Image (cartoon, grey):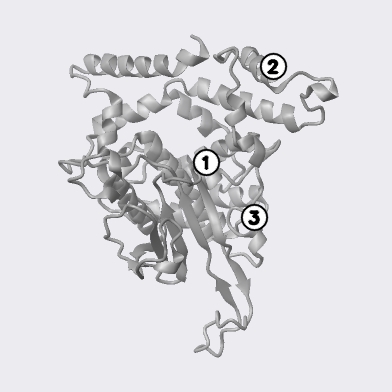
């Protein structure tokens, strides 16, 4: 098919495959897979995040009121505070606490579109964490005479443009907007970045959290994406119907996960094309006519043809590919990090979510290993050493490709 038809054919194929599998099992397909989005809401996701940090790390994620002067989503010339149970569906604030580690930091959620807002999904660091010694601003615990070192607590924001709540029934709270499964993946991806910034403890702020090697920094975010494709986590925690409150069945969760694996090879090849294009733009011999090369549009089309990936001639999709600016010859790290994340997932977390003895069954052990051997170091430690600390060995590409076969 032509590039413009590709998404349509993928959708049709996925639905037919699910119907075929159900027929072979003696049942019926449980509707179009897109209807599963009725099981995903913002509140379900927030509750799932709270469960994740509690069971993985022993951390409490608590929503708190937002002082009016901290808001950037509304006109701040009106009143003084917004309650977390307010129906405005705007900015939200969460504080993270650990019994032994004390306060860990603050995370803001700015999840829905509005006029003039940044139009993509991203994690922003408002204030990096760092170790500070007897700062004069009163940041250290003045009640503890033995405390000569303290940590500047990080403040981060997850900024997304998820389905707006106003597009759904006014009988439901605005905060409870229905999401697609891909939006859930996006939200958990950015949450992984946020936790990386929140849980790191480094001497210098420019080595804090996501201030890490470009071809490693996406590892935590891709790791947390895996929870959106874990049938046990979906059916027992994350997915509950917005009207009935009934959990997504395990069978339907497996269908959703299986559908996500369809055309996985094409998706990976597309990422390889984008990575090669990134190298072509920012490498030693950039593809620009002024230097005797071809245009970027010609190069983009050629790389698709070489990889056998559908491409719509006469289009220039790459002109809206923002990662080309932010990564600059490092986009390969996005796919590279997926390989690391798959290995960490299969080694530390896969199959450990049983919904009955949460915090046991190896889940907390795996979570703490990820925190103390990887997330805590931010960019202050060699990525390979961090991965070996988590895995007990050098990382392997096998788990990444094993995911194709399941």
The residue carrying mark 3 is 379
Q: Is residue 212 above or below residue 96?
A: above
- 200 sits left or right of 406 in the view: right
Task: Name the residue: 22% across, 34% down.
Answer: 249
**Do labels 1 and 3 touch, CB within 8 Å?**
no
- Can you give x and y, in whole percent of width and height, for residue 292 in the image? 84, 20
Of tags 2 and 3, the one toward the viewer is 2
| Residue farthest to the top, as pictured | 1
Give the numbered dot on residue 341.
Answer: 1
Between discs 1 and 3, the one toward the N terminus: 1
Judge left or right: residue 253 versus residue 123: left
Mark 2–mark 3 distance (CA, rounded to whole Å) = 37 Å
Q: Which mark is residue 260?
A: none
Q: Residue drawn at (64%, 41%), measured in percent from left and top?
A: 326
Above or below residue 156? Residue 22 is: above
User: Percent x, y for residue 225?
Assistant: 44, 41
Q: Secondary structure at mark 3?
A: loop
Per the image, the residue denoted by label 2 is 298
Above-or-below relation of 16 to 369 = above
């Amino acid at each position: 098919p032509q590039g413009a038809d590709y998404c349509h054919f993928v959708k049709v194929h996925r639905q037919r495959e699910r119907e075929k599998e159900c027929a072979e099992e003696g049942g019926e397909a449980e509707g179009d897979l897109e209807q599963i989005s009725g099981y995903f809401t913002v509140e379900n996701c927030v509750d799932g995040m709270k469960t994740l940090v509690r069971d993985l790390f022993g951390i409490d994620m608590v929503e708190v009121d937002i002082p009016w002067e901290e808001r950037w989503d509304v006109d701040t010339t009106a009143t003084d505070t917004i309650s977390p149970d307010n129906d405005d569906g705007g900015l939200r604030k969460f504080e993270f606490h650990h019994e032994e580690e004390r306060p860990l930091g603050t995370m803001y959620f700015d999840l829905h579109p509005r006029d003039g807002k940044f139009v993509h999904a991203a994690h922003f660091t408002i204030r990096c964490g760092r170790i500070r010694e007897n700062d004069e601003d009163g940041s250290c615990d003045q009640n503890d005479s033995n405390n000569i070192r303290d940590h500047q607590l990080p403040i981060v924001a997850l900024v997304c443009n998820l389905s707006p709540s106003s597009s759904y029934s006014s009988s439901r709270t605005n905060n409870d907007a229905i999401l697609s499964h891909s939006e859930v993946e996006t939200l958990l991806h950015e949450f992984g970045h946020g936790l990386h910034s929140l849980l790191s403890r480094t001497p210098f702020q420019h080595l804090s959290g996501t201030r890490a090697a470009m071809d490693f920094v996406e590892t935590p975010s891709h790791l947390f994406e895996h929870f959106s494709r874990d049938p046990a986590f979906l059916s027992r925690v994350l997915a509950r119907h917005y009207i009935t409150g009934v959990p997504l069945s395990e069978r339907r969760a497996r269908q959703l996960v299986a559908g996500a694996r369809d055309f996985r090879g094409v998706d990976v090849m597309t990422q390889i094309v984008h990575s090669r294009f990134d190298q072509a733009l920012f490498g030693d011999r950039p593809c620009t006519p002024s230097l005797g090369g071809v245009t970027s549009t010609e190069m983009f089309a050629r790389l698709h043809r070489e990889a056998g990936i559908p491409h719509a001639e006469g289009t220039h999709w790459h002109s809206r590919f923002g990662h080309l600016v932010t990564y600059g010859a490092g986009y390969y790290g996005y796919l590279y990090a997926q390989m690391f994340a798959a290995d960490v997932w299969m080694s530390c977390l896969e199959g450990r979510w049983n919904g009955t003895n949460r915090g046991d069954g190896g889940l907390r052990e795996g979570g703490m290993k990820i925190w103390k051997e990887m997330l805590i170091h931010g960019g202050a430690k060699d990525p390979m050493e961090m991965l070996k600390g988590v895995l007990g060995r050098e990382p392997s590409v096998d788990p990444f490709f094993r995911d194709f076969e399941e």
